[in-house]
Image (spheres, helix red, strand yellow):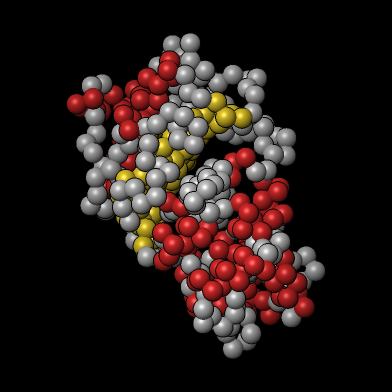
Amino acid sequence: MGLFKKKDKSNGFLDAYNNKYGNSKNNSISDITATHDKLSDPISDEVKSKHDSPLKNSNVLIDRRKIPAKEIDRMQQIEASKKYRRKIYKMFYKGYPEMPFVSQDRELNANWIEQAQMFPKQSILKKSRMIRFSDGLLPGHIYMLYWLGKYTNRRIPAYFEYDYGIHFVAEKEFLKKRGYLNDIDKPTELGEQAIRAHYNIIEERHPKPLHASKVPIGFANIDKVARSIPGDMTPGINSIPDSDRKLIQEELKIINSLISKAIDLAHLNVNLKIDYSLLRFENNFTYYECVPYTKTGRVSKYPLILHYAYGTHNQPMSPQDYFGELKYLKNGEIGAARLIFWNRNNGYMITIGIIKNVLAIKKVEKSITTGWKVVYKLES
């Protein structure tokens, strides 16, 4: 019996799929398709690129899942060793007016140098991000003012280091001393003026999508479930038993049909789908992650995550690398997903979630030389 067996009751998503496309493989949908805030809402917004996954250096493959989140957060606010910083500055940042902040987390918990060598345009901080405006502020200061005005008590995104080159805690104090932030870390009138004066920095990070919709497109979420998820799961990684694989195949039919809809919504001329036969069933590839509780001890919205990846996932410069995650609600329904597709240097990412009882396409992104471009977004 499978770890998370299929219930006898039929699944609404599968019913909807089969009613439209039939049950046979031959009648299924035709073949179809980012950065890290670097790992908010059902799907993480950490770095979203092929280098989300661990990359090999000459000796070590680093698995960040094994490092507690609090430890990563702590190390992201500590400067890397002088030796490591000098190496990075010499290799990647010659001629920059200021050197970007480099954390201990990057030094010890990531394969960043290998990543930067393989994907320089997507990994190396742009020189313009380290040039101050006439008012003495960096682009990262502007986005920090915007971010602090929008959020309270949020985990500090790693993109302040990787995309803006700043040490969040130190630069927050700088903004306070200069009168841009008040005592509760919210922008003052001077801070609001700075945001308005340099609003192009905000628009650069949040560009308007090429295509958008206000109506969720996907499958209606009716009161039927595919999985029976135990209420007493032990947190951690679990191998997928053979008896669960048929269920995963059926779920991927749903996902592939959503991929097809996503491609249409984004007006993309690509052919992508997740090929079940190319999945590799073992840790670091395709496996279950049981998360019955959040890090703060609350009951998880998504107690079960299916991580999937092709067998080529950890091969540097592999011509095809498809990977991602499906997140399941407590009732067994797919509640969210992040799907990443790389064909050589061309990347696509599709974000899925439940909106108004519809398992819908929320966002489609396409890789560009400087990062990721939103080509479709579901507007709230």
- Taking depth in this image into account, of 358 and 164 the one nearest to the observer is 164
Position of residue 37 in the picture relative to residue 78 (left or right): left
Considering depth in this image, is 253 or 213 the residue closer to the camera? 253
Residue at x 61%, y 58% (from the top left corner): 107
Report the residue at 42% width, 51% height from top: 50
Please count the marks in the image. Answer: 0
Height in image: 378 above or below 8?
Answer: below
The outermost residue toward the bottom is: 134
Q: Residue furthest right?
A: 183
Q: Residue at x 49, y 51 (%)?
A: 58
Where is residue 126? Give x, y as percent. Answer: 48, 73
Image: 305 above or below 263: above
Picture coordinates of residue 155 (x, y %)?
A: 67, 53
Q: Can residue 41 be seen by looking at this rendering?
A: no
Find the residue positioned furthest to the left.
26
Q: Residue drawn at (48%, 15%), measured in percent from left and top?
A: 2
Q: Is residue 293 above or below residue 148?
A: above
Q: Which of the 4 image quadrants contains residue 167?
A: bottom right
Residue 78 visible (yes or no): yes
Image location of residue 337, percent across then percent down = 46, 39
| Residue 120 image offset from top left, x and y in percent | 43, 65
Viewer-closest of 55 and 193: 55
